[in-house]
């Protein structure tokens, strides 16, 4: 029973504590409701339409505007403060200047009154009546300046003369003598000046002539150098024996050697390299007989057919040279006669060689009365002589 009462008292006490807590919570709830209600009233005041975020943005915008306005007002205040300080400093300066000018004014006014009294004027009006016009005053001031300037010049000249005189004195006669010598010196100076101008012009003329002489001298030196080079070249081109065309002869000899080499190659090709052509400077062309041990003999020792073959080789080599490096090629090459001196074997050899030398770029034509050639030529242009009946020459083409 005692324990039950204790438990009951404990529960009663806990109940009382819970009721007190409930009352405290109820009071806190009411306070919170009042706080919420107050805040809602404030929100409704700020945002009657209930758009809180929009109201906050609007308030922030207003705050930013207020901040900018405050910044502008502060800057304006600082500017006005700086302007105020400047005005204060300027005012202080002006006050000081005013005091200085007032002091100067009083001083100058006292000096003016003293000067006016000294000159005999009773007041300013009387002094103004006696004043000159602006034009007259300027004229007098100019005359005074000229006078002071002339006085200063004379004093300077006097000091110079006194320093030169060094305590010496001159009589009138001495002075007149010095004046006469001075006039003579002036005339001499004028004469010398005229002579100086004449000599100056003469000098300018001499300078111009000297410049032209230097220029022509330079040209002459260049021409002399060229002349020396030309004489040197002439000496180099001039032969040991005094021939004027030694260099030309040398070039012609070298070209002739080249023609001879080309002709020798052609002659060897025609004669199956039995003969070769050589050039002797003193004796002219010579034949190297490869079929006879390679001995060298004169061209006059050849037979008629061999001379024809050698002439043919030289003609072909020369035709190669006059083509001007292929710019003006000779497409036709004609051989007139010379075949009658060849025997049948040599004639066949020549025809074989001519057939080998004939190409698309070069056509070889034969002019001959030898009938044996007709069988070897595929295309022939035959000229019939005029007949006794009065008919003229006739030309006809024959193809084998």
Image: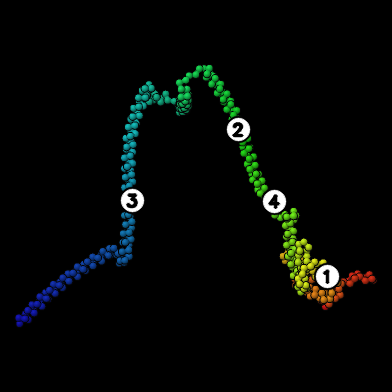
Residue on which disc 4 sits: 231
- Verify CB contact (< 8 Å) between mark 4 and mark 1: no
> In front: mark 3 or mark 2?
2
Residue on which disc 2 sits: 197
The earlier-in-sequence mark between 4 and 3 is 3
* Crowding near the residue tagged with mark 2, few <14, some 14–19, many ≥20 C-alpha atoms within 10 Å: few
The earlier-in-sequence mark between 3 and 2 is 3
Relative side of 123 to 44, left or right? right
Query: Does 251 appear above or below 159?
Result: below
The earlier-in-sequence mark between 1 and 3 is 3
Q: State how far apart marks 2 and 1 are (Cα).
A: 98 Å
The C terminus, quarter of image: bottom right
The earlier-in-sequence mark between 4 and 1 is 4
> In front: mark 1 or mark 3?
1
Badge 2 element: helix
Q: State how far apart marks 4 and 3 are (Cα).
A: 100 Å
> In front: mark 2 or mark 1?
1
Q: State how far apart marks 4 and 1 are (Cα).
A: 50 Å
Q: Which mark is residue 291?
A: none
The N terminus, quarter of image: bottom left
Residue at 32% in and 50% down: 78
Q: Is residue 266 visible?
A: no
Badge 4 element: helix
**Picture quadrant where residue 209 is located:** top right
């Amino acid at each position: 029973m005692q324990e039950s009462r204790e438990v009951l008292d404990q529960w009663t006490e806990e109940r009382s504590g819970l009721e007190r807590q409930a009352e405290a919570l109820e009071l806190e709830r009411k306070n919170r409701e009042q706080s919420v209600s107050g805040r809602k009233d404030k929100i409704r005041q700020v945002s009657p339409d209930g758009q809180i975020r929009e109201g906050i943005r609007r308030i922030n915008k207003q705050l930013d505007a207020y901040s900018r306005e405050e910044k502008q007002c502060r800057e304006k205040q600082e500017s006005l403060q700086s302007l105020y300080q400047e005005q204060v400093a300027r005012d202080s300066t002006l006050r000081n200047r005013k005091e200085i000018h007032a002091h100067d004014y009083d001083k100058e006014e006292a000096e003016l009154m003293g000067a006016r009294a000294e000159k005999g004027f009773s007041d300013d009006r009387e002094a103004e009546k006696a004043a000159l016009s602006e034009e007259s005053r300027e004229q007098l001031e100019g005359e005074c300046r000229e006078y002071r300037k002339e006085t200063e010049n004379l004093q300077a000249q006097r000091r110079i003369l006194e320093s030169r005189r060094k305590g010496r004195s001159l009589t009138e006669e001495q002075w007149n003598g010095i004046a006469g010598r001075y006039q003579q010196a002036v005339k001499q100076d004028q004469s010398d000046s005229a002579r100086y101008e004449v000599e100056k012009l003469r000098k300018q003329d001499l300078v111009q002539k000297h410049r032209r002489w230097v220029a022509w001298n330079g040209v002459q030196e260049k021409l002399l150098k060229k002349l020396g080079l030309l004489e040197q070249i002439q000496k180099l081109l001039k032969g040991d024996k005094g021939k004027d065309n030694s260099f030309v002869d040398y070039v012609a000899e070298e070209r002739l050697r080249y023609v001879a080499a080309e002709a020798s190659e052609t002659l060897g090709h025609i004669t199956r390299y039995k003969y070769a052509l050589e050039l002797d400077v003193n004796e002219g062309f010579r034949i190297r007989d490869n079929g006879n041990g390679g001995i060298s003999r004169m061209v006059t020792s050849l037979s008629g057919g061999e001379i024809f073959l050698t002439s043919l080789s030289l003609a072909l080599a020369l035709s190669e040279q006059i083509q001007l490096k292929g710019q003006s090629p000779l497409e036709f090459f004609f051989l007139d006669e010379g075949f009658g001196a060849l025997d049948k074997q040599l004639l066949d050899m020549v025809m074989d060689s001519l057939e080998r030398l004939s190409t698309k770029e070069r056509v070889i034509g034969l002019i001959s009365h030898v009938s044996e050639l007709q069988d070897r030529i595929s295309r022939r242009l035959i000229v019939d002589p005029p007949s006794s009946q009065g008919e003229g020459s006739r030309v006809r083409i024959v193809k084998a």
